[in-house]
Image (cartoon, helix red, strand yellow):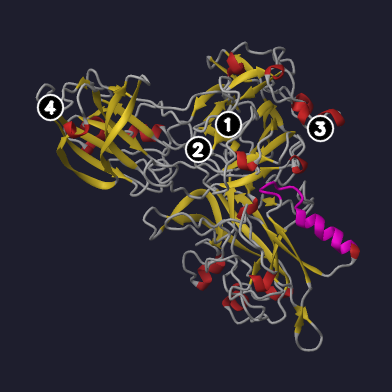
């Protein structure tokens, strides 16, 4: 089985959950992102997505016993501010007055994400799964009540989740050569076609390896199918003397299931009944009527395969890759605060290749209880990491969070993340790694847990970059703390680099001043079937009862810009005058499993008119009308924009992104912008001209929202007096296309960017 992680490839990247037969289908493809220490935020909270620097942050960390709740929890800070932070350091002496709990990993728990330990494959009947069964059956899925408790998006009927690998095996027997041996069973399957599969497999026992191995896949099912299979001739695959058994298996990929609501079922995923083995010496049948609900027949058992949990706390003196390999550690006082014990994920039994090819391993923090600081919208994950994780080693870091109540039942939400997996530049580096998690945990959350992990994609190589098949013990994690901050009066929103509008060229590939360009983000999932277009700007929010607005102005109007479109005459009359205009954004949507319609994505907003926006109502605009239309703007256009959000009950109390008063704390800008290139201007002779120089920043920040390379270059060129255009790519080179399936700039427009590579 291939690995399942709900993340993306960044110079930190994305989770690929893949079924054994077909590639994974997710809402978006994982993108490799570089983690760049030079652009990392300070611990005080200056991170991309946080509009105002939070000085009132309460930092949780360290593990203490909560007698009231009867469990180990994160220690609560006594006062706000970095100096008063609580923090997990894994030092034997603890930190900030909180001693080490003496628990293994100070209460953090390792998880092998390749091993599906959950028990979702057992006997049920009509009392638990309703009309899905009229008698007892072997069912893989969650009951309606379990779906509710697990906070599944689809809570109608039964259902299944993402990243499952549920397996049950029958009793075993020895086959005699020449014996007749057949298998027959009834089945009902309801799972995402082409991506989520049920298998019936004949296994035999390898006496040399002392392990069960798959001998033959007898049947594979997906979509909505049912029937009776058999008699299947098992003897045709056996030579005699082997010990054999039957494995029933269900695998789902990383997206489109009842869990996220993008593929909903009534009786998912599968059930089996009336299993009959008939032969010369082996005969048995099972209709499950004598088996207890939630149980398995005598001799049958749950079967789990996994790569292994390699998470642990190690003293840095025991690790072969010292943090001093980062030259700044010794040259710059206070550069790296990693010391004593750290979290690691390496296989100490294999020092030559300490991250197994199958590894997908994370650790989970003790529960963080927000009851002392409720309803604060800001969430801030801070940790230090040391790593030597070059891209082509394909060993990546990731993070994730979950919270409760995740739904009306009060249960935990699924794990959520930025859909990135992260690597580092060539050479070892120690750095602070800070993440704005405000859009992933709503202000109403009362508890949360955080996680960091490591995944090896070398064998899968999902981006076709080539793998070195070398790695080292890193990464190490230390000094983890989780902050909460902000005002409860307005909801937070956040965006990644690739959620923004992308600089564009004319769609027809020409330099005609009246040719028009698309307005789209760089997030284009070209390898998914059907492909998903990241066509609109998107933002993520921290609450459901909120509204998000796109605020913009035409800072520069193309010299030969036609203005007869309704955008200029009816939607935003006077917009060419440079004033600010706004429109309410709609809930984001993605292509559904069938590829013929769309489904809403809760907690995301896109730059299309909301149905209640006054312009949409007055002009009777259809669903999905883009605020900034495609094929409208000509070369020489510059759009400046920012986003604002508010609770529907208090529309006057807004949060802006970026901070329109003080500017983004890292980049200093007060709004974002994109251009239609080249930036043509009147030449004074009735025609147009444009700069002879163009600077292309090909995703130089790799997802790190510090000062962009293009910002630095632009500042330097302006000082020198150069006339230039700047083409800033906000997504990875690979898979960046526009609507006609090519680069956003052709060779005539930008001088030939060459072969697309990350």
Q: Separation of disc 3 and disc 1 at Cα?
A: 25 Å
Location of residue 131 with respect to 668 vertically, above or below: above
Determine the CA span between mark 1 and mark 2.
Answer: 10 Å
Q: Which residue is mark 4?
A: 178
Query: Quick one: 395 or 409, which is closer to the camera?
Result: 395
Secondary structure beneath disc 2? loop
Q: Secondary structure at mark 1?
A: strand
Please tell me which of labels 4 and 2 falls first in the chain: 2
Q: Secondary structure at mark 3?
A: helix
Residue bearing mark 2: 5
Indicate whether 438 appears above or below 139: below
Residue 337 drawn at (x, y percent):
77, 26
The dot on residue 327 is 3
Nearer to us of marks 4 and 3 is 4
- Classify mark 1: residues with Cα within 10 Å, few (<14), some (14-19) or many (20+): many
Do the residues bearing badges 1 and 2 touch, measured as CB atoms within 8 Å? Answer: yes
Which of the 4 image quarters holds residue 339?
A: top right
Cα separation between marks 4 and 1: 51 Å
Q: Residue at x 60, y 74 (%)?
A: 567
State the CA–CA distance, disc 2 to disc 3. 33 Å
Element under disc 4: loop
Range covered by the magenta-colored residues: 701-719
């Amino acid at each position: 089985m291939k690995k399942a992680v709900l993340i993306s490839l960044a110079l930190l990247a994305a989770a690929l959950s893949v079924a054994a037969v077909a590639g994974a289908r997710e809402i978006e493809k994982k993108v490799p992102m570089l983690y760049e220490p030079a652009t990392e935020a300070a611990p005080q909270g200056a991170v991309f997505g946080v509009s105002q620097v939070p000085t009132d942050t309460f930092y949780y960390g360290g593990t203490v016993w909560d007698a009231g709740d009867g469990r180990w929890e994160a220690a609560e800070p006594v006062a706000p501010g970095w100096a008063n932070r609580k923090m997990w350091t894994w030092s034997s002496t603890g930190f900030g007055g909180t001693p080490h709990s003496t628990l293994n990993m100070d209460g953090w728990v390792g998880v092998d994400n390749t091993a599906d330990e959950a028990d979702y494959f057992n006997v049920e009947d009509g009392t638990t799964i309703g009309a899905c069964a009229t008698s007892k059956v072997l069912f893989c899925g969650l009951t309606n009540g379990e779906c509710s408790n697990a906070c599944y998006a689809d809570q109608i009927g039964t259902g299944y989740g993402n990243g499952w690998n549920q397996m049950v095996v029958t009793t075993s027997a020895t086959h005699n050569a020449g014996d007749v041996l057949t298998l027959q069973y009834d089945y009902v399957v309801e799972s995402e076609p082409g991506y989520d599969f049920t298998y019936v497999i004949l296994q035999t026992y390898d006496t040399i390896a002392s392990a069960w191995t798959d001998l033959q896949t007898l049947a594979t099912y997906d979509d909505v199918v049912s029937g009776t299979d058999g008699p299947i001739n098992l003897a045709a695959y056996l030579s005699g003397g082997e010990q054999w058994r039957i494995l029933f298996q269900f695998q789902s990929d990383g997206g489109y299931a009842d869990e996220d609501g993008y593929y909903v079922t009534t009786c998912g995923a599968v059930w089996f009944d009336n299993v009959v083995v008939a032969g010369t010496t082996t005969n048995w049948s099972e209709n499950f009527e004598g088996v207890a609900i939630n149980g398995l027949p005598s001799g049958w058992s749950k079967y789990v395969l996994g790569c292994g949990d390699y998470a642990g706390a190690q003293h840095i003196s025991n690790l072969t890759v010292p943090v001093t390999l980062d030259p700044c550690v010794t040259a710059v006082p206070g550069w790296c605060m990693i010391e004593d014990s750290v979290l690691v994920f390496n296989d100490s039994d294999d020092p030559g290749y300490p991250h197994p090819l199958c590894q997908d391993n994370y650790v989970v923090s003790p529960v963080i209880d927000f009851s002392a600081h409720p309803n604060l919208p800001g969430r801030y994950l801070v940790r230090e990491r040391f790593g030597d994780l070059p891209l082509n080693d394909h060993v990546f870091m990731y993070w994730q969070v979950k919270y409760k109540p995740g739904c009306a039942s009060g249960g935990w939400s699924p794990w959520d993340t930025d859909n990135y997996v992260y690597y580092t530049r060539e050479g070892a580096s120690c750095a602070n790694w800070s993440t704005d998690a405000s859009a992933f945990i709503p202000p109403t959350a009362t508890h949360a847990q955080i996680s960091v992990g490591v995944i090896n994609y070398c064998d899968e190589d999902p981006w076709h970059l080539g793998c070195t098949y070398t790695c080292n013990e890193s990464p190490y994690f230390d000094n983890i703390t989780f902050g909460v901050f902000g005002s409860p009066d307005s909801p937070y929103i956040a965006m990644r680099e690739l959620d923004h509008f992308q600089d564009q060229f004319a769609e027809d590939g020409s330099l005609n001043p009246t040719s028009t360009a698309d307005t789209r983000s760089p997030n284009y999932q070209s390898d998914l079937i059907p492909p998903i277009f990241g066509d609109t700007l998107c933002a993520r929010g921290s609450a459901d009862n909120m509204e998000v607005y796109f605020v913009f102005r035409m800072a520069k109007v193309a010299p030969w810009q036609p203005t007869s479109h309704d955008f200029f005459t009816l939607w935003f009359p006077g917009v060419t005058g440079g004033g600010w205009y706004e429109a309410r954004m709609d809930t984001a949507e993605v292509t559904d499993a069938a590829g013929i319609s769309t489904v809403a994505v809760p907690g995301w907003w896109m730059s299309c008119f909301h149905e209640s926006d006054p312009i949409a109502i007055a002009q009777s605009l259809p669903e999905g009308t883009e605020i900034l239309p495609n094929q409208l703007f000509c070369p020489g256009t510059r759009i400046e924009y920012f986003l604002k959000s508010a609770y529907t009950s208090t529309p006057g109390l807004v949060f802006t992104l970026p901070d329109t008063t003080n500017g983004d704390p890292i980049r200093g800008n007060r709004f974002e912008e994109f251009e239609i290139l080249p930036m043509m201007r009147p030449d004074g002779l009735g025609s147009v001209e444009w700069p002879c120089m163009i600077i292309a920043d090909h995703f130089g920040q790799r997802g790190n929202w510090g000062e962009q390379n293009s910002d630095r270059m632009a500042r330097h060129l302006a000082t020198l007096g150069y006339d230039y255009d700047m083409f800033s790519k906000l997504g990875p080179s690979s898979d960046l296309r526009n609507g006609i399936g090519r680069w956003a700039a052709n060779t005539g427009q930008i001088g030939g960017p060459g072969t697309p590579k990350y």
